[in-house]
Amino acid sequence: MPDSMYGLVRDLYPICRSITGDGVRATLARIERDLPAPLVRSEVPTGTQVLDWTVPNEWNIRDAYIAHPDGTRVVDFRASNLHVVNYSVPVRARMSLAELRPHLFTLPDHPDWIPYRTSYYAETWGFCLGQRALDALPDGDYDVCIDSTLAPGHLSYGELVLPGDEPAEIVISTHVCHPSLCNDNLSSIAVATALARELAARPKRRFTYRFIFAPGTIGAIVWLAQNRDVVPRIRAGLTMTCLGDASPFTYKRTVGGRAEIDRAAALVLRDRGQGDHEIDFFPYGYDERQYNSPGFRAPIGSLMRGRHGQFPEYHTSADNLAFVSAERLAESLEIVRGIVDVLEANRTYQNLAPEGEPQLGKRGLYRATGGTNIPDLNLAMLWVLTLSDGGHALVDIAERSKMPFASIRAAADLLRDGGLLAQSRDAAATAYGS
Amino acid sequence: MPDSMYGLVRDLYPICRSITGDGVRATLARIERDLPAPLVRSEVPTGTQVLDWTVPNEWNIRDAYIAHPDGTRVVDFRASNLHVVNYSVPVRARMSLAELRPHLFTLPDHPDWIPYRTSYYAETWGFCLGQRALDALPDGDYDVCIDSTLAPGHLSYGELVLPGDEPAEIVISTHVCHPSLCNDNLSSIAVATALARELAARPKRRFTYRFIFAPGTIGAIVWLAQNRDVVPRIRAGLTMTCLGDASPFTYKRTVGGRAEIDRAAALVLRDRGQGDHEIDFFPYGYDERQYNSPGFRAPIGSLMRGRHGQFPEYHTSADNLAFVSAERLAESLEIVRGIVDVLEANRTYQNLAPEGEPQLGKRGLYRATGGTNIPDLNLAMLWVLTLSDGGHALVDIAERSKMPFASIRAAADLLRDGGLLAQSRDAAATAYGS
Amino acid sequence: MPDSMYGLVRDLYPICRSITGDGVRATLARIERDLPAPLVRSEVPTGTQVLDWTVPNEWNIRDAYIAHPDGTRVVDFRASNLHVVNYSVPVRARMSLAELRPHLFTLPDHPDWIPYRTSYYAETWGFCLGQRALDALPDGDYDVCIDSTLAPGHLSYGELVLPGDEPAEIVISTHVCHPSLCNDNLSSIAVATALARELAARPKRRFTYRFIFAPGTIGAIVWLAQNRDVVPRIRAGLTMTCLGDASPFTYKRTVGGRAEIDRAAALVLRDRGQGDHEIDFFPYGYDERQYNSPGFRAPIGSLMRGRHGQFPEYHTSADNLAFVSAERLAESLEIVRGIVDVLEANRTYQNLAPEGEPQLGKRGLYRATGGTNIPDLNLAMLWVLTLSDGGHALVDIAERSKMPFASIRAAADLLRDGGLLAQSRDAAATAYGS
């Protein structure tokens, strides 16, 4: 599985993606090969009104370069699709270096790296290149070519829904609009794909799972505009970004900050105990800001390793195949699976022997000889019994007891099988929304 | 009084107690000699269903030993009743040391101490001894004798109720099932007995006080099963354990964590300012876990010095007469009395001159000459006047003002006597339950 | 303006004020010269019942001294009005130094400073002087004269009301009863006067502003007794004290601690970032304790630099013209203006494009080219859009975002002007009261 995640990243890396265009379609097609079922694809025409936005023209690009008059390419789209400012309008001109310069973008602090830039909503063009490459360009005239089209077309996205016992949905959303950047966000595409495969293979799912592979911002906005009826069913969700690098995990909370997903993610990171942390919501980052907007307030947090704009390789050519690894992808899958498992298991129980402590011994649930060494499972059973008054879900009990969620869940399973717990109303009454 | 507390511990020390049997009865009889009124004794027959439990067979023991074939006792119940695993079934056999070994328990880290072990709910037998004593036993055959009976009988406990002006009850509960262990829990039996004597001598008690002397776990369960009607009247309570050693005080909160008893105990420990502390509820320890179970949620916390399982002498022969002292028992009585006094005084008042600050001077409540040195009592009066709007009890005011509860109470008394305060509804409306 | 504030302090400094008398009247007359409109003056007769108090006799003083029999004054009211215990009854007597001593007050730790003492509610007399001056007095007889009158008269205070668009009032209250003490409280009188002038000059005021210049304690009590109908209209307020010295600012919260004024003041001090801080309410200090009393609970906090009783010069002759400065007064005016500006701007909005993030670009509110450098204003706009669901006022948003209130306000203005925000119900629903 880790290998297949890295393999998917490797296959997707060369494709030039944007918020529209054939790169997205090729990406969805390749993802689909690793999914347990076909994606439901949507193609939304240019000009469609979506919430406060309008679907833009579709952008496609075939080639681009800056060349000496003799034809030698000094900047070549074929070498890296980051060389072209994403959504550049077509250009074919000869101009002096001085005329060209306002269209050239570099990272002086990282002279060998190519920056990633976009211009979705202003019609312009440009090239990105290393500072050292720029410095090496002699004065003189250059042939400039961007063989792109920016014209009415469609915006593409794909979805996979895995039905569960309950209609309530868990949403996993990843943006698929970045070109050759591995951590941001091929890593998350790979993790989401692997998770979908795992969940599809389970004999039983409590919740319905929806995987959204869509361009950032405008894609989430299109999805929301077309799925207003789904939003109230969203019980929890994650946008996933930058899950392939070596940073510890960061979970960014929903606007409300105490939704079930916030608490589930916090428990999983806490139980891992490796320096991961949580941050409060802020209205920047990725598509969690669309899902959390006042008109929707869907309880969707965000999971990441490297944080948006906070690692040097972010949005540069250094976010390449060497920057991510199969091992890190596997860890990320493990975390996401852990969060899903907390959500699946987070039930609220009623202690059926609520007066005093039930006699665990006579049910084979307790070592009969007294002593002072309390196995965690015994203590976990006592915590579950103490708090299972219909007002505490297992997540509450894990928080309050400071015990691993896995211990609490195992204890609840034992007690339920022993006839000491009955399922109570769903904790979701409080968990829904923010 | 301190001497009499230590005297009670000394008298009770040799008795071999268990969760049933004549040791408990002898203990209750000796306690009664120091109480202001006879205990109400209950004898509950073996087999009685109590909550989720059944009253077990009664256990009594007369003698036990391991002896050389020549009759020399190498382990002798007459030297310490800890030598026998509590609730051991009768044994009379000759066996080799190898056969005997699975029945022998030691503490390798404390080679001279005898551990305390029980086997209430599994019929077995065993001996406890020092590791050094075990190591000194030569191979060979031994005569093993446990002259015990485990047969239908009764479980015994005792209660003392001191009526007060209000039917609401303050419960003081101590377990009386441990054999020769002084801190755990003869110390608390002695403190409870002394407190009962003091409270009985008071001309006036606001609340009704109930002292429960019962075996741990099964005793509290029996009491709860037989007193369901009393539980709703419990306004506050304490289980008391390990109150004779030199540790600072620890108060363990109720499940709810904000009951009146939690706040009263916290104020008393805070005002003492000697490194005492509070801990959150956890479902282990002593009988507070029965009282706090979901079906009862009686607001009963726990006061202790040495903590359950956290001092080396815990459940060993080192918890002896030298491990506790009259001085520590006296300090413990002082703390419990302090908590009782906070509860008795914790009234909610209405400021009768609520508009602006009343003129304390004309009532003789304020020094007439201005100045900058504010005696605490003046400041305490201002705090009481400021917060006595019917929504704050004296405990709230002591917490908010960070002033000693004694200052707040004295200020309230002065103001009430000066006609500036009227008693409002009882703070118990919020304090009941957890 | 700073100069005029210091000039007002300088002019008021020599006047001998008390809680009643011509000194207060002269003070109000001088203040009025710097105000934008005449003060509404109240003269309340001696003996009037006000809340729990009675208006005392009026005190006036013309001269006072201690002199050698030859007429040489060794303590002279003409040199400093602090020399006489405020509210001293008339005295004209010859007595020995020994007889005189119980009437003499000094500060041994500051031997050259004259203390400030009062005796409003006990009829007595006394002199205050430097310890060094006292030590230099030879034994012998002295002529003692206090040429005062303490007789039925009136208590005087003044008010200025600047009407606003809304009837809700912001109250600024300063005590005017201290004689020659500059920081306490001529500084605040000067700041209040300057603020009144500024607010009067504004073309538009959202709220009604009420400036109260009244004697401490009894003055506030008189005002409250005569303005019960105004109290429910008080949306926020400040008592201002000691605003001329070099201490960082301290804001003392209302009793409730979360009123709008508490949060506005906290934001202004936070945004200033210079070591200022907030403290909880306590029932001592200045007139905030009258306004916050249970019968009124007006949401009035207190702003100060040097804290009541906590700087050495407090209530001594060292609180003189050199202890305050025009620069510090100007800083204080800036803080108070800042708080007023937060209150004026603290509206609650509804995001009119609540589904997803509105497209700021098409409204000219966002730089069109993507990038990673987020100007604060863009981020502030996103915060305002995210939280403007009718449940968060701008103060909430500034707290949550940790962004400067000025950024949040500017962002809200831009968004409102861009048609993206509509004013929602007033935040005052929650802000009123404490």
Image: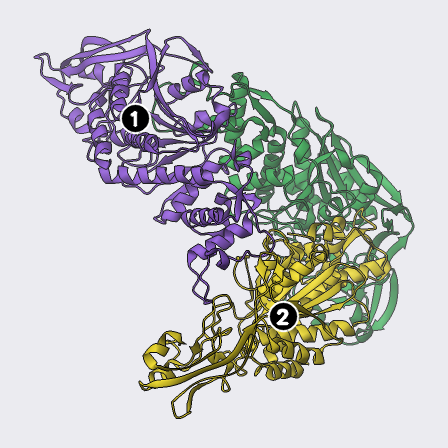
Chain colours: A yellow, B green, C purple
Chain for numbered disc 1: C
Q: Residues within 10 Å of mark 2 (few under 14, many from 20)?
A: many
Q: Which residue is mark 1?
A: C36
> Which element type, helix, strand or loop, lies under badge 2?
strand
Q: Which quadrant is home to the C terminus of chain B?
A: top right
Depth check, front residue: B112 or C103: C103
Query: Residue B159 falls in which quadrant of the image?
Result: top right
Which residue corresponds to the image point at 37% horizontal and 78% vertical from the top-left?
A: A100
Depth check, front residue: A324 or A131: A131
Q: Position of residue B155 (x, y in %)?
A: 85, 46
Determine whether, in the image, residue C330 is placed left or right of residue A14: left
Whether residue A366 is visible here, answered yes or no, is no
> Which amino acid type corresponds to the residue marked 1 in the rendered image?
Pro
Q: Which residue is mark 2?
A: A154
Q: Is residue B30 above or below residue B112?
A: above
Which residue corresponds to the image point at 76% horizontal and 61% vertical from the top-left?
A: A411
Which residue corresponds to the image point at 36% horizontal and 37% vertical from the top-left?
A: C336
